[in-house]
Image: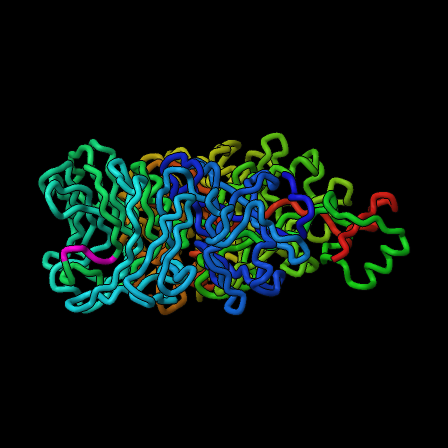
């Protein structure tokens, strides 16, 4: 992807396709910059750090995903002192199937980008709003406290009743708003002079509103453009303070009204996004992004010559709005439901997410230096902190919203493919660089400093299919801000055997903390008669026979074992490391095919067929998971509240600590109860896929079994669930070394950005 020539830094913005129900064209997206912006409350204050002051606010650019095609931008307000800015960006195409990427560039040394970026008073911002917009007012005082401005080419600016009537407020939904005083004797209004462009029949009228108190005696008018004397014409949009419903009324003339559309529900408090559309077949009302009234058959709305009033009806002061009005818009098309939903999500700053600050790659660095100048530059601290000797890297962000409590030495799954992480990123660039599966160990993962390496287990690397599953030991995962890792990769580097290995390599024992006593990825390893334990304890498993159970490539995380429900099982022995009697946790992914009497997953049992002999078991009674401990004299079962569904993967966990037994389904606590006995399991084999004496063999798939000798927390299991379903992390773009990688270049190739 390209880099816009002449710009020093940029950040990637992702529009969440889950909020886009249909393709959108020339859609105005709100980009809110602050210390807590977007869906994940990202801190993007480094933009203000770079630009230094309000005067540099136009030293920005926004491009499409290609990194070079510029988009038009309106700066509604730039507040450097408080590190806040509100930008409206015209995005040419927004995709409903995959996330849409745009880039925001910023550079204090660049000239003002007047060709694409402007304030509301600049003509260039007319390009942000498509030709169907007839009015767009951000409801700020502009140019003074007696007026509001229209950002479209139509110049439908509004004049207040008088200076400060209504008064501006700085606590609007999107920056400033107008605060209407409403009620008897109060007559705040804004008048927009009549012009033919506002005689709307096919229309969309929209606003963000906030109720004030007390409400006017009869009704609060939001927008009206109608003629009172007969013949009547036009429409109005208001809130009726008797039944607390929103109404849109219009006429085809001469009587009033021909149509009256009312919201289904009542509203009297809070902030809402209200929208009316008419396509001359039906009138519709939307509130907070969803349809909020029964569609009303309609027709052509009669035009007139009256002015448009905001906040008050010409009928008198019993019909005045009490509260805030923000972001008033009118269009001469009926926007569809997908447009309105996306506008709501955008207006409440829940449509986009932010990447990280990106410097330009080597290809765009401008000044050539001699080797001596390079050495001097490195000494002066020009390095971007790349791990020495590596050619490329990609940033990995662990979403703090899925981390409830700080975690230490957490085994995080990094899945590499053409659709990875919670934003479905294409990271096939890693495979493009490494060229073959033989080069799979030519990788490194570091903490956020770019230097401190983490241990990595390669569960499987499939170069041909462009898929890889890596387990990374992350020293610290933060619940308050996203945790950053870097994945380095370089086909010219030596294998990183000190930190990276296959399951058969001893180095991978370091990925799993000492409390992990068994970690099996449930692959055939080293042959179809065995499964391997990736921990230092070597609790490998032996199948009942070759291919019994059989491996399947349709696991939750790469391969899994497929149990036939007849006699398939795996024996992992009885090493003392498995004796988690005082406390313990068992976690696994399971997809059951048939109920067949419930099905067993784990057992450690003594001779005999009674419940008191089921020393440590996990099975199903019908569709209900069940965890049982026993000591040969008594037993105690934890029967989950929730159930599982055949044919679907579930992440199940059971823990005990001598005080409580707990069960989790898909990362959430499902059941807990007091623990009144201590299991005794010394000397009894651990088997997977059966609870034999109860006649329960699993018919289904088991993947990723992890056994620990501690009671891990609810926060740990939630993070494990999100990680293992590939929803905990997101990826940045491929990064090339700037100066820390310069030693690998010839003097002719050395290029450095002097800033």
Question: Which sits in the foreground, 345 or 477?
Answer: 345
Q: Is the C terminus in the top left, top right, bottom left or bottom right quadrant? A: bottom right
611 left or right of 118?
left
Extent of the magenta region = 311-315
Query: Residue 280, position in %: x, y?
Result: 22, 32
Relative to 105, is 79 on the left or the right?
A: left
Residue 449 screen position, x and y as percent: 66, 61
Which is more toward the observer, 729 or 159?
159
Q: Residue 738, how many percent across, how many down?
A: 74, 51
**Callout count:** 0
- The vertical placement of 270 against 235, above or below, is below
Residue 439 vs residue 574: left or right? Answer: right
Q: Residue at x 65, y 44 (%)?
A: 4
Instruction: Work out whether residue 136 can be spotted.
Output: yes
Whether residue 312 appears in magenta in the rendering, the answer is yes
Q: How is the image coloured?
A: rainbow
Q: Residue at x 65, y 43 (%)?
A: 3
Q: Is residue 397 magenta?
A: no
Residue 584, relative to residue 596: is it above or below? below
Main SS, magenta residues: loop
């Amino acid at each position: 992807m390209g880099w816009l020539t002449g710009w020093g830094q940029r950040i990637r913005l992702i529009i969440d396709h889950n909020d886009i129900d249909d393709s959108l064209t020339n859609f105005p997206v709100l980009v809110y910059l602050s210390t807590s912006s977007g869906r994940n409350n990202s801190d993007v204050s480094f933009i203000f750090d770079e630009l230094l002051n309000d005067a540099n606010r136009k030293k920005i650019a926004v491009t499409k995903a290609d990194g070079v095609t510029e988009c038009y931008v309106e700066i509604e307000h730039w507040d450097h002192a408080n590190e806040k800015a509100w930008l409206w960006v015209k995005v040419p195409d927004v995709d409903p199937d995959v996330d849409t990427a745009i880039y925001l560039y910023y550079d204090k040394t660049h000239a003002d980008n007047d060709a694409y970026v402007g304030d509301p008073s600049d003509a260039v911002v007319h390009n942000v709003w498509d030709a169907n917009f007839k009015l767009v007012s951000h409801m700020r005082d502009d140019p003074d406290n007696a007026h509001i401005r229209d950002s479209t080419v139509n110049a439908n600016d509004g004049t207040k009743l008088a200076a400060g009537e209504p008064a501006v407020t700085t606590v609007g939904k999107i920056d400033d708003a107008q605060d209407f005083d409403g009620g008897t004797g109060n007559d705040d209004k804004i008048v927009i002079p009549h012009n033919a462009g506002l005689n709307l029949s096919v229309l969309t009228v929209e606003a963000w509103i906030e109720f004030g108190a007390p409400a006017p005696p009869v009704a609060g008018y939001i927008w009206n453009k109608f003629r009172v004397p007969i013949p009547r014409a036009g429409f109005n949009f208001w809130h009726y303070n008797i039944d607390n419903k929103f109404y849109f009324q219009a006429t085809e003339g001469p009587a009033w009204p021909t149509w009256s559309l009312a919201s289904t529900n009542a509203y009297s408090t809070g902030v809402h996004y209200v929208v009316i559309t008419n396509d001359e077949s039906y009138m519709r009302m939307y509130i907070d992004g969803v349809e909020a009234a029964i569609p009303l058959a309609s027709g052509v709305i009669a035009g007139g010559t009256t002015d448009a009033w905001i906040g008050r009806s010409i009928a008198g002061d019993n019909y005045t709005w009490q509260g805030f009005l923000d972001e008033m818009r009118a269009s001469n098309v009926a926007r569809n439901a997908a447009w309105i939903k996306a506008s709501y999500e955008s207006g409440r700053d829940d449509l986009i997410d932010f990447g990280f600050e990106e410097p330009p790659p080597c290809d765009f660095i401008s000044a050539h230096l001699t080797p001596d100048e390079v050495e001097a530059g490195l000494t002066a601290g020009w390095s971007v902190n790349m791990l020495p000797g590596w050619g490329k890297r990609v940033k990995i962000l662990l979403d703090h919203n899925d981390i409830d409590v700080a975690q230490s030495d957490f085994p995080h799954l990094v899945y590499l493919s053409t659709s990875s992480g919670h934003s479905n990123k294409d990271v096939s660039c890693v495979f493009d660089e490494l060229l073959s599966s033989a080069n799979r160990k030519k990788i490194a993962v570091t903490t956020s400093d770019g230097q401190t390496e983490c241990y990595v287990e390669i569960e499987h690397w499939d170069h041909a299919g462009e898929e890889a599953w890596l387990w990374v030991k992350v020293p610290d995962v933060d619940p308050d801000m996203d945790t950053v890792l870097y994945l380095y990769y370089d086909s010219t580097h030596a294998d990183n055997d000190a930190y990276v290995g296959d399951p058969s390599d001893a180095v991978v024992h370091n990925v799993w903390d000492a409390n992990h006593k068994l970690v099996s990825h449930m692959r055939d390893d080293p042959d179809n008669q065995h499964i391997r334990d990736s921990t230092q304890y070597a609790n490998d498993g032996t199948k009942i026979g070759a291919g019994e159970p059989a491996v399947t490539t349709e696991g939750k995380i790469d391969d899994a074992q497929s149990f036939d429900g007849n006699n398939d099982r795996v024996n992992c022995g009885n090493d003392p490391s498995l004796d988690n009697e005082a406390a313990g946790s068992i976690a696994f992914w399971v997809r059951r095919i048939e109920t067949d009497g419930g099905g067993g997953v784990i057992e450690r049992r003594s001779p005999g067929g009674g419940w008191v002999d089921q020393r440590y078991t996990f099975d199903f009674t019908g569709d209900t998971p069940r965890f049982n401990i026993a000591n040969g004299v008594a037993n105690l079962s934890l029967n989950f509240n929730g159930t599982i569904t055949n044919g679907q993967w579930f992440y199940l966990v059971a823990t005990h600590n001598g005080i409580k037994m707990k069960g989790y389904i898909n990362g959430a606590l499902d059941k807990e109860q007091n623990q009144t006995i201590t299991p005794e399991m010394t000397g009894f084999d651990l088997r997977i896929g059966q609870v034999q004496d109860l006649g329960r063999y699993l018919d289904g798939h088991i993947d990723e079994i992890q056994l620990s000798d501690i009671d891990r927390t609810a926060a740990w299991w939630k993070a494990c669930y999100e990680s293992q379903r590939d929803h905990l992390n997101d990826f940045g773009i491929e990064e090339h070394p700037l100066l820390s990688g310069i030693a690998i270049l010839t003097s002719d190739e050395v290029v450095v950005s002097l800033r």
